[in-house]
Image (cartoon, grey):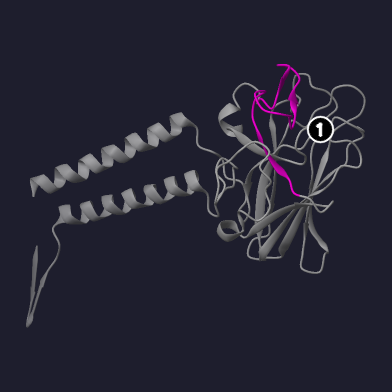
Amino acid sequence: MNVNCPGIHLQTAPEHGKRSARSTAVFGTILLVFASQVFGAGGTIDFETVPGSASADQLAIASQYQSLFGVKFGLSTGGTPFLEAVGSADVGNGFVNDNLGLPDVAAAGYTNQLKSFFLRLGTTTLESLPVPRLIITYSAPVAAASAEIWDIDAQGPGTEQWLVEAFNGVNAIVDSSLSPLGTNNGPGSLDGKPWTWSFNHGVTADIHRIELSFTGSKINGIGLAFDNFSPSSPMEPVPEPSALLMLLSGLGAIGARLRLKRRRR
């Protein structure tokens, strides 16, 4: 369409060009949403890969993730936590799925969330009191963090419970989250399932260190299964495979429509 004014000649873009631009913008927005859902705003450590080496059962974890995520892992005893492989083919275990009678196995429907590795406190056996604290130290303070603790249940005498605390630069507690109290392994329990904790301080980056402490009443047979750690962002829901397929189908349809419009020009 041409617009004529005295001394001025303007030519506007064709209407179908405007629609194409709008479609392209929508396409880009969907891609950004898709990427943020899959990868997370600050990235997630799921322990399926370890910078500088391959994930392996009983691999000590300390500063491997520092360059990429700005975090180091340690224990209050001065040692390091270790990777644990799921299933019973390896040495030792981090937890026991009591209903299935299997070590380090997620409950039905949670296998893809736990995947193949998680972080634990010791190497071969479950812990007895006093249980060391898992300590996560940041190279630079952050405003948010989240992760999962698996299998907070109980079999036999005693209970299981974990306290997660965030500390600022002067060792003052700035946030905390107390897990559900695990009293049994029956229906409704966290047997083989995750509990998610999350801190979100908006724009205030005051989290310098995070500590996980056992606060249950059990005296032995205590395990920590720590996984899917988002060091600098609150936990985002993991898209279901069906949702991802639907989203990819929608992206494909938009792309096909854009290509068809270009051919008609």
Secondary structure beneath dot 1 equals: loop
Question: In the picture provided, is 206 more to the left or to the right than 239?
Answer: right
Question: Residue at 39% of width from left, 32% of height from top?
Answer: 245
Q: Name the dominant secondary structure of the magenta segment.
A: loop
Q: Residue furthest top?
A: 100
Q: At which x and y percent is residue 49?
A: 55, 44
Residues in magenta, as a range: 80-105
Q: Quadrant of the N terminus?
A: bottom left
Question: Residue at 86% of width from left, 27% of height from top?
Answer: 183
Q: At which x and y percent is residue 162?
A: 81, 41
The answer to which quarter of the image holds residue 160 is: top right
The one nearer the camera, 176 or 52, is: 52
The answer to which quarter of the image holds residue 148 is: top right
Question: Residue at 77% of width from left, 39% of height from top?
Answer: 122
Q: Amino acid at mark 1?
A: Leu
The one nearer the camera, 126 or 245, is: 126
Is residue 87 in the magenta section? yes
Question: In the picture provided, is 140 more to the left or to the right than 44?
Answer: right
Q: At which x and y percent is residue 147?
A: 67, 45
Question: Residue at 70% of width from left, 26% of height from top?
Answer: 192
The answer to which quarter of the image holds residue 242 is: top left
Which residue position holds label 1?
Answer: 126
Is residue 216 in the magenta section? no
Q: At which x and y percent is residue 55?
A: 58, 41
